Amino acid sequence: MNIFFEYVPAGSVSTLLRSYGAFEEPLMRSFVRQTLEGLDYLHVRNIIHRNIKGTNILVDNKGGIKISDFSIATKDGDNILTRTRTHRHSLQGPVFWMAPEVATQRSCSPKADIWSVGCFVIEMFTGEHPWPTLTQMQALFKIGSSAKPPIPSHISSKACDFLQHAFEIDCEQRPPAAELLQHPWMFKPP
C-alpha cells in the first residue's frame, strides 16, 4: 500500500515559529481562521481532532493551512471515556494543549478542540507552548484543576477576549468553531 500526501513546503507552524519567532496578529488571525474553518467542517461531521497544536498545522507556500495528524481523532458519540477498562482509550493528546474536561477524563467533545485552538493562539503569540515553565505532569495537574493558561499581556483586547471564550472552563458554555469564526478578532481591524 502506498499513501501519498500533498507537499506542504513551509512545514508546520511550529517550524516557522522556531525559525522566525512569534507571529504578528494578522498572520495569526489568518491561521486561526483557517483552522477554525477546518474544525467546523470536522465537527459538523462529528469528528474530534484531539491534537490541535502548531506541529499539526501545516502551511503551504500561499499561506494556506492544512490540519494534519488525525492519529487520535475520534467520532463524537463514540463515548471513548466511558468504555470498559479493557477497551477504554488512554488519556490521549498533547498535554500542554489539553482541555480540562479531557485532562480529568470527564468528557471529550468538539469543544476540546476549541480549547486547543486557544492554546495554539498562545503558541503563536509567544513562540512557546502554553505552560512553558511546567513539566507535562505539572501542566496536567494545573489543567485538571481548571486553570487557564496564562494569556500574554502584550496582545490586543480583541485577541484577549477571543482567548477568554476559547478558555471557557465549562465546555458546555465554550463556543463552537462556527461561533468563534464570528468573533471580532477574526476580522481585519479598521
Image: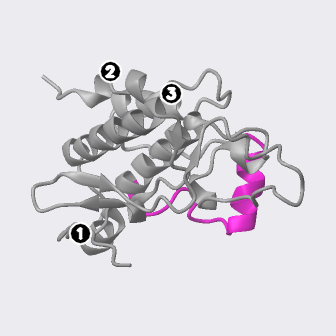
Residue that carries the numbered disc 3 in the rendered image:
165
Q: Of callouts 2 and 3, which one flags the residue occurring earlier in the amino acid sequence?
A: 3
Of the pair 100 and 36, the residue shown nearer to us: 36
Residue that carries the numbered disc 2 in the rendered image:
182
Q: Of callouts 1 and 2, which one flags the residue occurring earlier in the amino acid sequence?
A: 1
Q: Is residue 161 visible?
A: yes
Q: Which residues are magenta?
A: 126-146
Q: Position of residue 89 (x, y in %)?
A: 75, 57
Kindly identify the residue that appears in the image at 68 percent across and 27 percent down.
Answer: 170
Task: Report the side of 97 relative to 158 (left or right).
Answer: right
Per the image, label 3 sits on a secondary structure element best described as: helix
When asked about the image quadrant of residue 42, the answer is top left
Whether residue 85 is situated above or below residue 17 in the rendered picture: above
Of the pair 72 and 150, the residue shown nearer to us: 72
How are the colours assigned in the image? one colour
Quadrant containing the C terminus is top left
In front: label 2 or label 3: 2
Per the image, label 2 sits on a secondary structure element best described as: loop
In front: label 1 or label 2: 2
Kindly identify the residue that appears in the image at 61 percent across and 37 percent down.
Answer: 76
- Disc 3 and disc 1 in contact, CB within 8 angstroms: no
Q: Of callouts 3 and 1, which one flags the residue occurring earlier in the amino acid sequence?
A: 1
Q: Tell me if mark 1 has few (under 14), some (14-19) or many (20+) residues whose alpha carbon lies within 10 angstroms of its own.
A: few
